[in-house]
Image: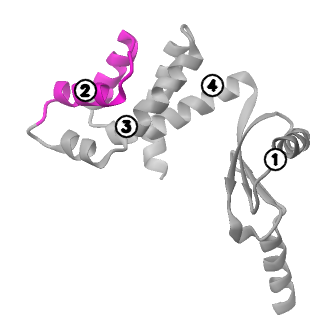
Amino acid sequence: MAELATIARPYAEALYQVAQKHDLQAWAQKLDVLAVVSQDADLSQFADSPKSTPEQVLAVLTAAAKQELTPELLNFLQTVIANGRLGALPEVVAQFHALANAAAGVADAQIFSAYPIEPAQLADVVATLEKRFGRKLLPQVTLEPTLIGGIRVVVGDEVLDTSVKHRLERMKVALTA
């Protein structure tokens, strides 16, 4: 959804600039919790209600997050809620992480595997992928049995698919062409 990304970008950039002056890791963790809480359907309905004030929405959000928030984060949340952008908070947090990763020279790697990957195997796979993609990767493994075998790796907008399912699909196209 390009519109949501466009809305989230200025918030993420401003948030990142302020977070750089503090503990970036602690801010990232708090933002992750806030993003998860903001996706709650009941909270969204409450925030969209004309009867609820931005102060009430902020109070409910911070109470549900159960986090000690800095004045800067509270100010940020007040701005997001006052502008009716609570639904964009997960995208803001995702772009915040992307900015932090880019500054650190790392990238998130989503690894889809048909079978569980042992830690030793994962280290080997990540080392190979880091050479392939030319940057340090933070892996996140997701099981996807439909791949049959092999892995599919997504790093940003790059995809490396070595799965059996992908190979079978390529063979099917070649045979039917």
Determine whether 26 is above or below 112 in the image. Answer: above
In the rendering, which numbered label is found on residue 37? 3
Which mark's residue is nearer the viewer, 1 or 3?
1
Mark-to-mark CA distance, 4 and 2: 25 Å
Nearest-to-viewer mark from 3 and 2: 3
Which percent across, then down, holds residue 86?
32, 37
Q: Are marks 3 and 2 in contact (CB under 8 Å)?
A: no
- Say few, some or many: other residues with alpha carbon within 10 Å of mark 3 (under 14 / 14 to 19 / 20 or more): many
Let me know if residue 136 is in the magenta part.
no
Q: CA distance from mark 3 to mark 2?
A: 12 Å
Tell me the amino acid under the disc marked 4: Ala
Foreground mark, 4 or 2? 2
**C-alpha gap between disc 1 and disc 2:** 42 Å
Q: Are marks 4 and 2 in contact (CB under 8 Å)?
A: no
Of the numbered discs 1 and 4, the one sitting upstream in the chain is 4
- Asked which secondary structure carries label 1, the reply is loop
Q: Which amino acid type is marked by label 3?
A: Val
Up-down relation of residue 22 to residue 153 (above or below): above
On the image, numbered disc 1 is attached to which residue?
Answer: 118
Q: Earlier in the sequence, mark 1 or mark 3?
A: 3
Which residue is located at x 86 percent, y 84 percent?
Answer: 174
| Amino acid found under the numbered disc labelled 1 | Glu
Residue under numbered circle 4 = 100
Residue 61 counted in the magenta span: yes
Q: CA distance from mark 1 to mark 4?
A: 28 Å
Q: Earlier in the sequence, mark 1 or mark 2?
A: 2
Closest to the camera, between mark 1 and mark 4, is 1
Q: Which residue range is magenta in the image?
A: 52-80
Dividing the picture into quadrants, the one containing residue 160 is: bottom right
**Label 3 vs 4, first from the N-terminus:** 3
Residue corresponding to mark 2: 58
